[in-house]
């Protein structure tokens, strides 16, 4: 998931265009981009689109950002969108493990009522200092949590923290990445609101890539190519990862805690990284 394109749930005329684009994932928003009077129409439109043959056959990941579990809209969002077409439900405004578990309970009730066997997984937003401090417990709150997504605007703006200072950005990216690693879930970088500032987007994306993030959110289609470029896996990286995985399968290396590949020592963390890289690149 190099790129995740934000799609306002109240703008159904954009859905097909987004599906035809180059983003790896689409994130249909029922939260901040939709006013209270349009919540019902938006969730109906999103659910209807996800049920179309075009959406169901697409290789893109389909994500729905619901309203926060603490709002009166959440249960209706879940009722509308849980089903075959949804890869992940994106939970905003989460600040505790208890909130994650309460959301899971609601989703599980809907699944059970429908006889739904597959368990819908979660992408949880980390958007406040309190959430960042609790990020590891939030990530580990339930096995349904697949990943954490960082929201820097919500975390920085209320406190006057300068977003264009990459030292500030790096400190938060690193903290959330370590929390995600502790829970063995992926980390996804969040949105960059200054669409005209491609250099700023590239700088944040490059930093996130170096810290092991899976990809970055896009709030405009023109950012998709920037994310795909920043998080692309090179052929050299693929070949190196393949050699590591093949070496681990070699009978001579079975049962050994470490072995040599291309003149470098490889142990379990390097092997897991190589396996993850090949999976992200969809390479055997």
Image (cartoon, helix red, strand yellow):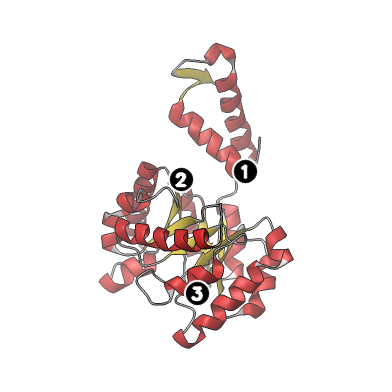
Tell me how far mark 2 sits from mark 1, CA to CA.
14 Å
Q: At 29% across and 67% down in the image, what residue appears? A: 161
Query: Residue under circle 3?
Result: 30
Residue 143 vs 112, above or below: the answer is above
Q: What element carries label 2?
A: loop
Q: At 39% across and 70% down in the image, what residue appears? A: 68
Mark 2 or mark 1, earlier in chain: 2
Q: Which of 2 and 284 is in front in this view?
A: 284
Q: Taking 21 as reference, is 210 left or right? A: left
Q: At 56% across and 82% down in the image, what residue appears? A: 41
Mark 3 or mark 1, earlier in chain: 3
Assess disc 3: are there few (<14), some (14-19) or many (≥20) residues with their C-alpha within 10 Å of its C-alpha. Answer: many
Q: Can residue 234 be seen in this view?
A: yes
Q: In which quarter of the image is residue 46?
A: bottom right
Residue 65's disc number: none
Q: Quadrant of residue 234?
A: top right
Residue 176 drawn at (x, y percent): 35, 52
Residue 14 vs 268, above or below: the answer is below
Q: What element carries label 1?
A: loop
Tell me how far mark 2 sits from mark 3, CA to CA.
29 Å
Q: Which of 220 and 199 is in front in this view?
A: 220
Residue 244 drawn at (x, y percent): 56, 26
Residue 281's disc number: 1
Front label number (3 vs 1): 3
Residue 212's disc number: 2
């Amino acid at each position: 998931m190099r790129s995740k394109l934000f799609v306002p749930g109240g703008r159904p005329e954009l859905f097909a265009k987004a599906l035809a684009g180059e983003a790896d994932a689409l994130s249909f928003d029922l939260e901040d981009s939709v006013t209270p009077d349009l919540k019902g129409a938006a969730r109906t439109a999103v659910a209807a689109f996800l049920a179309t043959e075009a959406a169901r056959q697409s290789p893109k990941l389909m994500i729905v950002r619901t309203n926060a579990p603490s709002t009166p809209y959440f249960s209706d969002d879940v009722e509308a969108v849980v089903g075959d077409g949804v890869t992940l439900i994106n939970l905003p405004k989460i600040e505790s493990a208890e909130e994650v578990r309460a959301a899971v309970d609601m989703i599980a009730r809907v699944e059970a009522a429908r006889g739904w066997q597959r368990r819908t997984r979660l992408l949880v937003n980390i958007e406040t200092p309190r959430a960042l401090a609790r990020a590891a417990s939030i990530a580990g709150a339930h096995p349904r949590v697949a990943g954490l997504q960082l929201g820097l605007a919500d975390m920085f703006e209320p406190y006057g923290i300068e977003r264009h200072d990459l030292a500030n950005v790096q400190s938060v990216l690193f903290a959330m990445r370590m929390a995600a690693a502790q829970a063995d879930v992926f980390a996804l970088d969040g949105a960059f609101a200054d669409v005209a500032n491609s250099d700023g987007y590239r700088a944040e994306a490059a930093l996130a890539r170096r810290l092991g993030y899976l990809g970055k959110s896009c709030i405009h289609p023109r950012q998709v190519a920037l994310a795909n470029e920043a998080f692309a896996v090179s052929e050299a990286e693929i070949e190196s990862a393949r050699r590591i995985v093949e070496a681990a399968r070699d009978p001579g290396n079975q049962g050994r805690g470490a072995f040599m590949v291309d003149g470098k020592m490889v142990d379990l963390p390097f092997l897991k990284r190589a396996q993850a890289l090949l999976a992200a690149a969809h390479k055997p």
